[in-house]
Image (cartoon, rainbow, N blue to C red):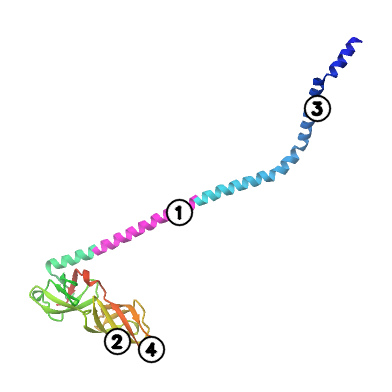
Amino acid sequence: MKVNYLQKNRLRHPYFRRIVFLITIFVFGAFIFSFFDGTIISIVSPAWRAENVIARSLRNSLALFGSQKTLVTENAALKERVFSLEAEILSLSSKSIQENILLELVGRKQDSNMVAAAVLTHPPQTPYDIIIIDVGSEESVALGSEVFLPEGPILGTVSEVFSKRARVKLFSSSGEETNAAFERDGVPVVLKGAGGGNFKFILPRDIRVEKGDRIFSLDITPALLATVAEVNIRSTDSFQEVLAQGPTNIFALRFVFVTP
């Protein structure tokens, strides 16, 4: 009877009851979670998949951004290289032209009935669009000989000749008049020198004129004389005034060709 009484006292001990309660909850929880494991996973799986999709999209976007940035950098580098090569080509072309002219000057060789000449003096050192060249009568240069740029356009004619020098009056000299033809429709015009390598002429207002239109000489083989730079016309005028520029900067002339 004494033993049974002790066993009942142990079962009634508060700590023992708590331990039994915790063990029961643990076993019940394990059973419940094992039962709902598949359901929970099926519920959470879409969220996991969405997270993976977002992560992949973010990685792809970052990779695309990096790729575009690289392409922009490479494109800028290629453009810079192209500009550098174009400048180099132009430099080589210009240098080749100058070397050919210098070779002509050394022996005063005539090519296609032309004599190469160096420009000794040009505006603003000389007035009224006059240049002095280093060839004269000894190289068969005469009054009226035409003077051209190495590239082809005509500049003016020889107005005074010495044995080793010649004075050239450019068509753009103030007051100088030159018969020419407007490239558009071949309309004849009279170019009036305005100084500084510039010209002006008058046309009926109904003739179409645009900036960049060219004016040529009336020779059998027309040479470029000027290019339209500006058109002035008022609503009350029946004519339009056209301002044109010569084919080169006369303040920086170095070489010309002269027809003997």
Residue 197 screen position, x and y as percent? 24, 76
> Is residue 14 one of those drawn in magenta?
no
Q: Relative to residue 97, is residue 258 depicted above or below?
A: below
- Which residue occupies 12% across, 79% down? 160
Residue 88 lies in the magenta-colored region: yes
Q: Write down the residue under mark 1.
A: 71
User: Is label 3 in a helix, a strand or a loop?
Assistant: helix
Kindly report the distance in space between the C-alpha atoms of the residues bearing marks 1 and 2. 54 Å
Distance Cα–Cα, label 2 vs label 3: 117 Å
Q: Pick whichever of labels 1 and 2 is earlier in the sequence.
A: 1
The single residue placed furthest to the right in the displayed view is 1
Element on which disc 4 rests? loop
Q: Position of residue 147 (x, y in %)?
A: 19, 76
Mark 3 or mark 1, whichever is nearer to me: 3
The image quadrant of residue 196 is: bottom left
Identity, as a three-letter code, of the amino acid under mark 4: Thr
Residue matched to label 4: 236
- Given the image, on which type of amino acid does mark 1 rest? Leu
Q: CA distance from mark 1 to mark 4?
A: 57 Å
Residue on which disc 2 sits = 188
Front residue of 159/89: it is: 159
Q: Position of residue 10 (x, y in %)?
A: 84, 16
Magenta part of the protein: which range? 66-94
Measured as percent of width and height from the top left, residue 216 is found at 28, 80
Mark 4 crowdedness (10 Å alpha carbons): few <14, some 14-19, many ≥20: few
Classify 203 as above or below 46: below
Closer to the chain start, of discs 2 and 3, is: 3
Q: Which residue lies at the image location 33% right of the left edge and 86% below the top edge?
A: 203
Residue at (35%, 59%) from the top-left corner? 83
